[in-house]
């Protein structure tokens, strides 16, 4: 969506694939939860105006045939953003003058609606955070926020790369945590999933909505899973869709169904929030504690985002490009000469995958990865030292 001169409104911007769109035409707008044949999350609204966008100008037109790009007025409030890639770089923003805070909040809402790849949220310390797909994308978003959406002077922090936690091996021993009343014991082991399975989950080939038997057969045939384990997946996490799986491997345990939902909730909480959160019930915090213990026992480390970059430069500038890539731990895997190149330099990048951050163990405070962990914890207001496994592991 593209912001209009009228604050708070947007042009719905896209291509006409079939037919002709014109002012007054009623269109069906399907939300993300729409099911064919049902009326839930389905809106039928009339297009107020059609416009042609020419650079910075907007020209009203009567209609637009298929194959052309057009702007629509009057349906923006029914369109929801859809994120294709998770943001990997973030910066916090704050206003220079406290009285401008409401304008910043409203500007963040407009920015989030105008760009489907930007994420805005408020963290635990009260900071307003803007996350984007890369440094350049984030720089453009913050410029739009300050000049077009919020229209107030801002104080912007340095870019922060978003890391992901993972494990490199299987837990050395089975982790155990007891509930506060000592009536419940939860045992758990953490181990990494294969890269192929993680990719299938992220690509939507393996989801929690799949038929149980069909998914179990796919996991067994394609990824070498035991069929019994594949049929006893309790949850995907975080947010019921991530590439973390909670699998029940118990045998002949009574009343297990009574705690299944609570264990799954604790799993979602642990894979999403981290150790600074608290929960009021009995099973959920116990599940989080045993998850943390199992992770600490399985060689925890960090993963960093890796970008795929195409750089077009004249031959005279290649030395400088190689120097920059070397400092960023980049790797050139293809090089091609193109005649008639006149551009001084044209880089294009896209997020490609996550890769384990090299530089030692995450639990070693003197290693490179350990220093990154300490910096992250300090920025979040946590104790710099990573809590030891004894804080989560209970003995019989």
Image: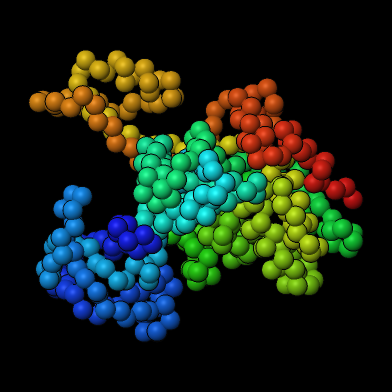
Nearer to me, 60 or 249 = 60
From the viewer's perspective, is 169 left or right of 209? right
Answer with the quarter of the image where residue 389 lies.
top right
Work out whether residue 137 can be spotted.
no
Q: Position of residue 386 (x, y in %)?
A: 73, 36
Work out whether residue 144 can be spotted.
yes
From the viewer's perspective, is 127 left or right of 290? left
Question: Measuring 72% from the left and 47% from the top, which residue is drawn there?
Answer: 276
Question: Measuring 72% from the left and 72% from the top, which residue is drawn there?
Answer: 257
**In this figure, which colouring scheme has been used for the structure?**
rainbow
From the viewer's perspective, is 121 left or right of 367? left
Question: Measuring 69% from the left and 32% from the top, which residue is drawn there?
Answer: 363
Nearer to me, 291 or 249 = 291
Q: Position of residue 357 (x, y in %)?
A: 54, 32
Q: Establish if 242 lies above or below 364.
A: below
Q: Establish if 128 lies above or below 62.
A: above
Q: Position of residue 343 (x, y in %)?
A: 18, 27
Answer with the quarter of the image where residue 346 lies.
top left
Q: Establish if 81 lies above or below 147.
A: below
Answer with the quarter of the image where residue 328 lies.
top left
Question: Measuring 54% from the left and 43% from the top, which residue is drawn there?
Answer: 97
């Amino acid at each position: 969506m593209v912001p209009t001169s009228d604050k708070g409104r947007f042009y719905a911007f896209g291509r006409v694939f079939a037919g002709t769109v014109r002012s007054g035409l009623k269109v069906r707008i399907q939300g993300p939860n729409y099911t064919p044949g049902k009326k839930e999350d389905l809106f039928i609204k009339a297009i107020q105006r059609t416009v042609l966008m020419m650079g910075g100008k907007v020209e009203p037109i009567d209609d637009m045939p298929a194959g052309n790009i057009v702007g629509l007025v009057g349906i923006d409030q029914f369109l929801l953003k859809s994120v294709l890639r998770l943001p990997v770089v973030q910066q916090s923003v704050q206003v220079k003058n406290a009285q401008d805070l409401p304008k910043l909040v409203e500007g963040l809402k407009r920015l989030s609606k105008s760009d489907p790849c930007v994420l805005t949220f408020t963290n635990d310390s009260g900071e307003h955070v803007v996350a984007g797909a890369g440094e350049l994308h984030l720089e453009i978003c913050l410029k739009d926020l300050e000049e077009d959406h919020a229209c107030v002077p801002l104080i912007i922090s340095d870019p922060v790369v978003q890391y992901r936690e993972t494990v490199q091996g299987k837990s050395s021993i089975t982790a155990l945590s007891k509930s506060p009343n000592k009536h419940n014991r939860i045992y758990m082991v953490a181990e990494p999933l294969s890269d192929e399975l993680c990719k299938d989950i992220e690509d939507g080939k393996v989801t929690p909505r799949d038929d149980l038997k069909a998914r179990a057969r796919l996991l067994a045939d394609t990824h070498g899973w035991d069929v019994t384990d594949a049929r006893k997946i309790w949850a995907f996490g975080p947010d019921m869709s991530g590439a973390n799986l909670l699998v029940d491997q118990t045998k002949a345990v009574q009343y297990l169904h009574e705690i299944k939902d609570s264990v799954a909730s604790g799993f979602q909480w642990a894979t999403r929030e981290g150790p600074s959160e608290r929960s009021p019930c009995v099973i959920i915090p116990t599940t989080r504690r045993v998850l943390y213990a199992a992770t600490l026992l399985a060689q925890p480390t960090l993963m960093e985002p890796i970008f795929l970059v195409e750089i077009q430069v004249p031959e005279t500038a290649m030395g400088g490009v190689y120097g920059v890539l070397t400092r960023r731990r980049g790797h050139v895997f293809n090089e091609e000469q193109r005649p008639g190149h006149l551009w001084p330099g044209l880089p294009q990048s896209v997020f490609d995958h996550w890769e384990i951050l090299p530089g030692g163990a995450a639990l070693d405070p003197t290693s490179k990865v350990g220093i990154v962990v300490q910096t992250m914890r300090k920025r979040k207001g946590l104790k710099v030292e990573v809590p030891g496994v004894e804080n989560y592991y209970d003995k019989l």
